[in-house]
Image (spheres, rainbow, N blue to C red):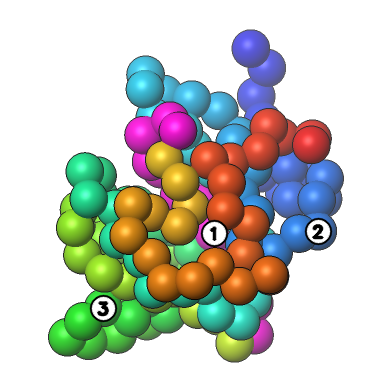
Amino acid sequence: MDPINLADAFTGFDALWSPRVVTAVNDYDVRVAKVRGEHLWHAHDDTDEFFLVLEGELDIALEDRTVHLKPNDVFVVPKGARHKPSSPDGARILMIEPSGTSTVGDRHEEVPDHVDATTGHPLGA
């Protein structure tokens, strides 16, 4: 396997809330996504969700507070916690999740048209 440049990976797609799988580590996907606006309230019943903000800013609303992330900030949403990511001005993020994890979780509100309910697309797709 050759090194993967994340800046180059982001040039390969424009879709928002539609992660690309950059690589895998054991049974986990490393995904990157461009985000802007709001995602949706959802929860992952069986897994934590790791977020790293590479560019821009990301808010993650939880039931009891909102976490504000700036570039180079990391946050883990605990399994089972309802959350809603959003980014008014847009961000580029990296996530680590078990392979096959849905972007809209196991429990979620109605999926709006701008959200791609996926388990991640291959890089370059």
Circle nearer the N terminus (3, 2): 2
- Residue at x 37%, y 19% (from the top left corner): 26
Residue 4 percent across, percent down from the top left: 66, 30
Q: Is residue 24 magenta?
A: no
- Quadrant housing the N terminus: top right
Q: Which mark is residue 77?
A: none
- Residue at x 36%, y 34% (from the top left corner): 98
Q: Is residue 96 magenta?
A: yes
- Residue at x 68%, y 32% (from the top left corner): 122
Relative vertical location of residue 56 with respect to residue 8 in this rendering, above or below: below
Question: What distance separates the C-alpha of mark 1 from that of mark 3?
Answer: 18 Å
- Circle 3: residue type: Leu
Circle nearer the N terminus (1, 3): 3
Question: What distance separates the C-alpha of mark 3 from that of mark 2?
Answer: 27 Å
* Residue identified by numbered label 2: 14
- State the count of labels: 3
Q: Is residue 91 visible?
A: no
Q: Which residues are drawn in magenta?
A: 89-100
In the image, 107 versus 60, the foreground residue is 107
- Residue at x 54%, y 59% (from the top left corner): 93
Question: For residue 97, which quarter of the picture?
Answer: top left
User: Which one is closest to the eye, mark 1 or mark 3?
Assistant: 3
Circle nearer the N terminus (1, 2): 2
> What kind of secondary structure does the magenta stretch mostly adopt?
strand
* Residue identified by numbered label 3: 62
Residue 5 percent across, percent down from the top left: 69, 37
* Residue identified by numbered label 1: 93
Q: Is residue 99 left or right of residue 119?
A: left
Question: What distance separates the C-alpha of mark 1 from that of mark 2?
Answer: 13 Å
Residue 99 percent across, percent down from the top left: 43, 30
Residue at disc 2, secondary structure: loop
Residue at disc 1, secondary structure: strand
